[in-house]
Image (tube, helix red, strand yellow):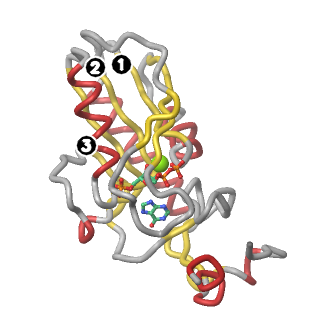
């Protein structure tokens, strides 16, 4: 395990500052307010990565909505997807006939998003769209529509604002890239 005495000792580069993220949430909140006006919206957050983005995003949305969560994971302690999505905790809400918006921190290979979209659609949701803070298009394996996103991100492993490496660094208030020597401690 790598120690994290302070942020500057582990971060190589900051890609998205707190201000950048705030602006993305505001822009997306406005777009989603238009999209879901007059609809019976159910927002589903993908735990654990989406937790900060979801709570900031929904507070920028001026529509009545309900929230639920699904705990899905496929990375474990690795920087590569296992290719298998594990559903640890399911939603408690009946999605039949509902307009569903899945909120994610990142769409990378697309395995997780495709899994969630297919599952919720198979349960009879009226519509299933998604909103991700980051869209790592270069790494896509599964062809899945990402209807709303904050920014495209290059093919680098990022942490912060919910995004983790082996469960750590989620609580950084910005998104950045770890120093190579920190990554090395997790990959040897
Ligand atoms: O597009 P993909 O290649 O599937 O990657 C994206 C998914 O991977 C991460 O979750 P992870 O499995 O690490 O679980 P976590 O959200 O609990 O960190 C991230 O939060 C997304 O849910
Ligand atoms: O770049 C990433 N960082 C953290 N978690 C992730 N899950 C998929 N891609 C990433
Ligand atoms: Mg996740």
Point out residue 113 in the picture as x, y percentages from the top left corner. 31, 44
**Camera-side residue of 122 and 34:** 122
- Local secondary structure at mark 2: strand
Q: Residues within 10 Å of mark 3 (few under 14, many from 20)?
A: some
If the image is split into quadrants, where does the N terminus sit?
bottom right
Horizontally, residue 78 falls left or right of residue 95, namely right
Can residue 90 be seen in this snapshot? yes
The outermost residue toward the bottom is: 181
Q: Residues within 10 Å of mark 2 (few under 14, many from 20)?
A: some
What residue does disc 3 label? Answer: 114
Horizontally, residue 107 falls left or right of residue 68, namely left
Count the numbered circles shown: 3
Q: Give the residue drawn at x 57%, y 62%.
A: 77
Point out residue 116 in the picture as x, y percentages from the top left corner. 32, 35
**Camera-side residue of 160 and 139:** 139
What residue does disc 2 label? Answer: 99
CA distance for labels 3 and 1: 20 Å
Labelled pair 3, 2 in contact (Cβ < 8 Å): no
Q: Is residue 31 above or below residue 109?
A: above
Question: In the figure, residue 87 lies in which quadrant?
Answer: top left
Q: Of the residues under marks 1 and 2, which one precedes in the sequence?
A: 1
The outermost residue toward the left is: 143
Q: Give the residue drawn at x 52%, y 46%.
A: 53
Labelled pair 1, 2 in contact (Cβ < 8 Å): yes
What residue does disc 1 label? Answer: 41
Q: Give the residue drawn at x 29%, y 46%.
A: 148
Can residue 18 be seen in this snapshot? no
CA distance for labels 3 and 2: 17 Å
Horizontally, residue 87 falls left or right of residue 143, namely right
- Local secondary structure at mark 3: helix
Q: Is residue 38 above or below residue 183?
A: above
Q: Give the residue drawn at x 58%, y 61%.
A: 164
């Amino acid at each position: 395990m790598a120690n994290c005495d302070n942020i500057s000792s582990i971060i190589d580069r900051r890609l998205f500052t707190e201000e950048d993220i705030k602006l993305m949430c505001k822009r997306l909140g406005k777009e989603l307010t238009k999209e879901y006006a007059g609809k019976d919206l159910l927002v589903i957050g993908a735990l654990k990565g989406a937790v900060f983005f979801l709570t900031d995003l929904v507070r920028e949305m001026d529509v009545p909505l309900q929230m639920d969560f699904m705990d899905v994971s496929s990375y474990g302690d690795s920087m590569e997807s296992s290719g298998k999505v594990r559903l640890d905790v399911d939603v408690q809400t009946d999605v039949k006939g509902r307009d569903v918006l899945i909120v994610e921190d990142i769409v990378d290979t697309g395995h997780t998003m495709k899994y969630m979209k297919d599952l919720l659609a198979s349960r009879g949701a009226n519509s299933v769209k998604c909103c991700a803070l980051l869209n790592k298009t270069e790494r896509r394996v599964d062809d899945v529509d990402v209807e709303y996103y904050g920014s495209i991100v290059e093919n680098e492993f990022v942490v912060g604002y919910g995004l983790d490496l082996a469960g750590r660094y989620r609580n950084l208030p910005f998104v950045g890239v770890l120093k190579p020597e920190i990554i090395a401690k997790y990959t040897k």
